[in-house]
Amino acid sequence: MTPPAVEARALTRRFGAFTAVDAITFDVAPGEVFGFLGANGAGKTTAMRMLTGLLAPTSGGARVAGFDVARAADQVKRSIGYMSQRFSLYEDLTVRENVGLYGRVYGLRGREIADRLARLLDRLGFAHLAGERVGRLPLGWKQKLALSVALLHEPRVVFLDEPTGGVDPVTRRQFWELIYEAAAGGTTVFVTTHYMDEAEYCDRVSIMVDGRIAALGTPAELTARFDVASMDELFVRLARPGPGAA
Amino acid sequence: MTPRASADRAAGPGPGSGHGSGALSAFLRKEARHLLRDRRTLAILLLMPLVQVLLFGFVVRTEVGRIRLAVVEPAPDVATRALRHRLAAAGRFDVVAVLRSDRALPRLFASGRAQQAVVFPAGFADRLAGGEPAPVLIVTDATDPNTGSVMRAHATTVVRRYEQELRARRPATGDPPGRSPGGAAVLAETRMRFNPTLASAHLFVPGLVAFVLTIVSALMASVSLTREKETGTMEVLLVSPLRPWQIVVGKVLPYLALGFANVLTVLLAARVVFGVPVRGSVALLLAECLLFIATSLALGVLIATRTSSQRVALTASLMGLMMPTLMLSGFIFPLESLPAPLRALSAVVPARWFLLVVRGIMLKGVGIGHLWDETLVLAGMTALLLGVSARRLDVRLPGGR
Amino acid sequence: MGAAPGARGEWLARTRARLGASLRVVLALARKEVVQIVRDRATLVQLVVIPVVQLLVLANAASFEVRGARVFVVDEAPSPASRALVARFAGSGYFRVVGWAPSAAPADEALLDRRASVILRVPRGFDEALAVGDGPARVQLVVDAEDGAAAAVVQAYAAQVLAAYGAGAAASKAGGAAAPAATPRIEVRARGWYNPALDYHVYMVPGILVSLVTIVGTLVAAQSIAREREIGTIEQLNVTPVGKYEFIAGKLLPFWLLAMAELAVGLAIAHLVFDVPVRGSLALVFGAAALYLVAALGVGLLVSTTAETQQQAQFVSFFVLVVYLLMSGLFTPVDSMPRWAQWLAELNPVKHFVGVMRAVLVKGAGAAEVARPVAVLAAYAAVVCTLAVRRYRKTTA
């Protein structure tokens, strides 16, 4: 059996007296599209930051792509891609320059970068935009570009933090097509979102409430188990404001 | 409607003004909270003047301390030894080396180990005894012309005094005592008016006040206004019942208070630590300070109307105000030493006029009678700056900026 | 590590490969930085135009020389001698006579009004005192010392004028009388080294150059990291394999290059426009500059790791800078500072670099003479950069 792409074991993070992530445990299989859901303030982003090596766990541990996030952070970083909530490509650099930068940062050489850039532009239909400054692109296109850059070095796992915020439904659909393509190619996709319809697109989802995982399974399983009509309803039921929720 | 007309309407008595001023005071409170919450910046704004007072008072001076002197005596004799002792005893010199030849001098000077050298010839005492001219070479490191001249003067004085001593010992031969060819026939008794001890503290405090106020008022005001524009909250404000001038006043008032607090800090510290006096009227001094704060704030506002970027505002204030204030206002370098074109340029620097006012009040104790022209210039600048800014503020969101 | 040459060779090859990869990443980051700088007009102006303009303007402003000091003459008993004295002052080039009165009151007014900055009072009986020669004849100088530095300079000038007058007067009296035999006479010859023309540019310009390059480099470097943090691109970089050293090197490199280039241009201007001599080895100057700039930029980066916003970064680094500059001997000599301040100045890299600049350019010092300050600069650079790297954490604890 192949080892999980992402393993969390009692992963915990405290900020002073406040426990943001409370001993969560789960696995993500390679090639899965895993949806990490929850209300604002439930702990999703904190958990993701621990998995990507941006935040140190208070206790517990996790392995990503087989490497321990606390002890082998460097190897973890080489094996993952990341798209942050705040758009993080350089707005004053062109598409080509951004790709060139991140390509080199991940150790790709000139020829490879050129090839992958060409493929990327082709796939996105951006060929005419290669020399355009990223800041000038419409939001939806920026998001798609950021995703492509995160996938540029063909990582084992890619982490997407609320990637479709503020984007129109058509663009969102296209975005998810890109995600499926990546998953089909073997990349594990770990995505957080609070759009419940997107939950339906995932292979499995987990719902975080107050720092704990309140539900974990495929959308079909969960709607059946909790006897609700949609993920939306499930979410409302589970994420009812409790003590301590923001 | 011009801002002035609408301001009149809002400021005058009547129902409209009540609504406006309620919003204004709420806005003022928000601004004050902003300022107080940014602890780090606040700490610097309050601490910086204090640190600078101490720094300038103790560190920035041009007085020459002890001079590192090398003596070259190829053939020591009574006279060279006597002169060497006079130099050492004069209290201004530290004899760092006594050499037999001048070969090592260039290296000593180049490394800074010696700043001055006195070079004697061989047979110095014999020449003096025989009435032949006895040359003494005084070599001074003139890299800094200022200290170079002073050092030269000190060394020459010691030598000359020794010469007088020698002459006094000889019995006068037909000459009235005291008269000697080449000796000084005219002496000046100098009084340093207003600053008898030439204390540097007295020199810098007025300039420091100007410097600090420029930073706190102009810089912070411009940054605060552009920050609002940058984060987009300015839009929200402009849509609110607050009029543009009220927004500006609201943003700027906290810095007026802060600037004033700084002035008091600096004056107090200068008084307590360095004994810098305020010989004139304190009330007049504070009033003029308020005027200058207003001028600086107006400058800050003007900068803010021309840009939406905090960074640009900050840089413009730093480079465009700080440097001229440091260099062209008479703060460190005297106005008299500026070449003509720069002196003309300095007339545009408000700090230059403010400095004259503050020095006048603090050191000379003069009243408004002697300072009315400088005050008028400052007031005029303030009015002009506000006028230009007001026009730009009238256009609600300067397109794209 | 095995003693076998194969193992060692392998280790070498691996290290070289790793270094090569690191270097490529650093270059990629540096290139991005350069592109960002060039595309941002505001930064470009800040980095290029302003320093050049300031160098040209400030170099002319920074001097303690006083020209045309306004003198008000109070001549209580006008006589040929007193008139000759006043004529000396007027003709000296240092002074300008702006008023004349027989009593002190109008002179005082002029001083308060700032119409004059010096009062020369020739007392009654000056003429007789001079003629009799029983001791020196005295005059009184009242100098407006509101500006202490200018006052001292004015006093020195006046002393010179009076000395010249005195020598002239005595000579005309001594006339044909032969000097009595065996009167001791010391002939003082004064020589000023390095700057015989007493040109303030020689002293000030190297200092101004240093301050400009420092300000620009440190401020801009400081705000660069803060800006990335503010915008959020720093998070993206933190997730990548880019190491701390690589990140910092990638940031420092473009600014370092830029500052060195500016120094070179500035030196050219200094030499061609302001006649600042270049007596020593330029290689030495640039070598010291290389070390110094690493230290200066390191300080800027260190500051930015502590600042939360761009504004704070720029502000704090400016504050730190002003303190450094004032205590560096740039504007006022370190020798004039009190003992404790001189000790503190030893910790100031600006002080050492300015010292090296002046020593090498103006005095023609060689490597041996400036070895100590250069060593201090190297140490400083190492310490500051280590601190900056330590402080920069990719992972928040």
Image (cartoon, rainbow, N blue to C red):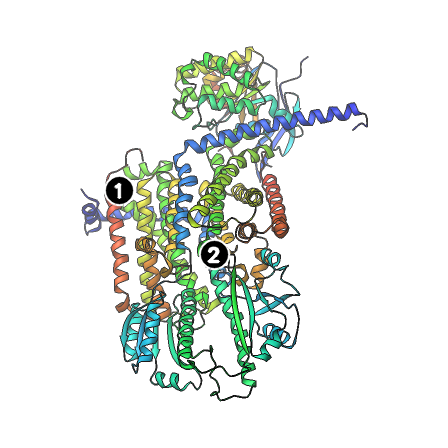
Identify whether A94 is placed above or below B321.
above
Could one spot residue A211 in this view of the protein? Answer: no
The residue nearer to you, when weighing B292 against C61, is C61
Number of on-image labels: 2
**For the residue labelled by badge 2, is the local secondary structure a helix, a strand or a loop?**
loop
| Residue A107 left/right relative to B60 | right
Q: Quadrant of the C terminus of chain C?
A: top right
Mark 2: give few (<14), some (14-19) or many (20+) Cα within 10 Å: many
Could one spot residue C325 in this view of the protein? Answer: yes
Q: Tell me the number on the disc at residue C331.
A: 2
Give the amino acid at mark 1: Leu
The CA distance from mark 2 to mark 1 is 41 Å
Q: Tell me the number on the disc at residue C139.
A: none
Are labels 2 and 1 on one chain? no
Residue B271 occupies quadrant: bottom left
Which residue is the site of mark 1?
B393
Residue C231, horizontal then vertical, whole percent: 46, 33
Q: Quadrant of the N terminus of chain C?
A: top right
Identify whether B76 is placed above or below A33.
below
Give the amino acid at mark 2: Phe
The nearer-to-camera label among 2 and 1 is: 2
Kindly identify the residue that appears in the image at 55 percent across and 14 percent down: A218
Mark 1: give few (<14), some (14-19) or many (20+) Cα within 10 Å: many
| Residue B336 left/right relative to A8 | left
Q: Chain of mark 2?
A: C
Residue C161, horizontal then vertical, whole percent: 40, 71
